Amino acid sequence: MLAGFLLAFTFSFDDFIIAFFVAGSETTLPIYVFSSIRRGVTPEINAIGTMVLLASLVLLITAQVILRRRALTPTGVNFMDLKDRTAFVTAGGAGIGRAGALAMARAGATVVVTDLDASRAEAVAAEIAAAGGRAEGLGLDVGDDAALEAAILSAAARHGRLDVLHSHAGAQVPGRLDQVSVADMDLSWRLNVRAHFVAAKAAMSIMAPRRQGSIIVTSSNSGVQYDREMIAYCTTKHAVIAMVRQIAVDYARHNIRCNALCPGFVDTVFNAGFEAQMGGRAALESYVAETIPMGRFGTPEEIGEAVLYLASDRSAFMTGHALVIDGAESL
């Protein structure tokens, strides 16, 4: 490209066209043909043709810059492009849920953001809209089976499709066997397993007939290791990975993918249980610095990029996987 422009100031108009073509722009071939037959026309028409050509070249270069910024594969397919797809997110009002919603919206998806706090979901939807994306924010208690199912089915009906489910909502109840009540264990199971089951079941009823979709369930790196004094949390996070793998193998031939997102310590309010267990924020920060090989918290945005990866065709051959993102803590 640059070579073509430099030569334009040194050689004739025809030389410029030829140089630009040789520089690698196949789309200039029609313009080259035009230049080869332009002889004999009036200077006025020639000048107009030159202006049109230069404008075309500017547009061509602009298009190539845009394409290079879109992480295209050599075949020209943008695997991170979620244009015309619809994603449904639970607990999307803050932290990882919000980061995933924003990432998918940036990739072109219409995102239905839900949260127990409707105002937080609406704020994230407004943030997406302000950036030029498409979203709606809704209040939703994932512990209400009927409400969860209805929210997913109605969102699919409104938007005409459902391509991605990120079932993110969960609960963290700290404690050993003798410290956790049956009610707390039931709460953990209801939010960390049952709600994901209900959400996936509703989503599958839409995705399976279309033979297309990605279901992402948030587990934790606690689902691939064993924390201390976290019986309810670890039990349910291990269980939901087993459920994800069963869904994956059952629906792989339907072209529906199901994967578990397993973040480690990410600096969000969700760490309240660990923080209380460890004796405060300072103790938690010390643990992270000393125990995690990378010596830091992850960020919601880093996990959000993983959500986008699992939602997109970039992970088209990945299903039944527990994607651990924890700075090597679980190793």
Image (cartoon, grey):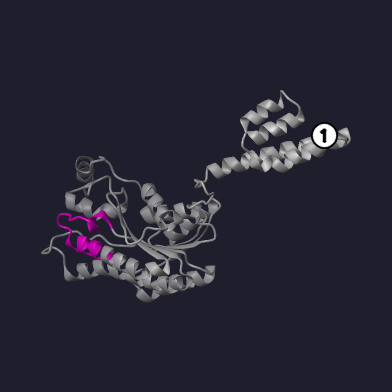
Q: Write down the quadrant of residue 84 in the picture.
A: bottom right
Task: Quadrant for residue 146, please give it.
Answer: bottom left
Task: Compare residues 259 and 307 and report the one nearer the observer.
Answer: 259
Task: Identify which residue, 288 or 55, lies in the foreground.
Answer: 55
Above/below status of 165 relative to 11: below
Asked whether residue 302 is drawn in magenta, I would say: no
How packed mark 1 is, by other alpha carbons closer than 10 Å (few <14, some 14-19, many 20 or more), is: few
Give residue 47's position: percent from left, percent from top. Answer: 82, 34
Query: How many circles with numbers are drawn on the protein?
Result: 1
Q: Which residue is mark 1?
A: 47
Q: Looking at the image, can residue 196 be seen?
A: no
Residue 230 forms part of the magenta stretch: yes
> Which amino acid type is shown beneath numbered disc 1?
Ala
Q: Position of residue 304 (x, y in %)?
A: 39, 51
Instruction: Name the residue at 72% across, 43% down.
Output: 30
Any part of residue 229 in sight: yes
Q: Give the residues drawn in magenta, as a range.
A: 220-240
- Most prominent secondary structure in the magenta stretch? helix
Looking at the rendering, in which quadrant would you find the N terminus?
top right
Residue at 87% x, 33% y is: 43
Q: Residue at x 22, y 46 (%)?
A: 284
Left or right, residue 276 beside residue 24: left
Tell whether 209 sits left or right of 258.
Answer: right
Q: Secondary structure at mark 1?
A: helix
Give the side of residue 27 with respect to residue 153, left or right: right
Q: Residue at x 19, y 59 (%)?
A: 174
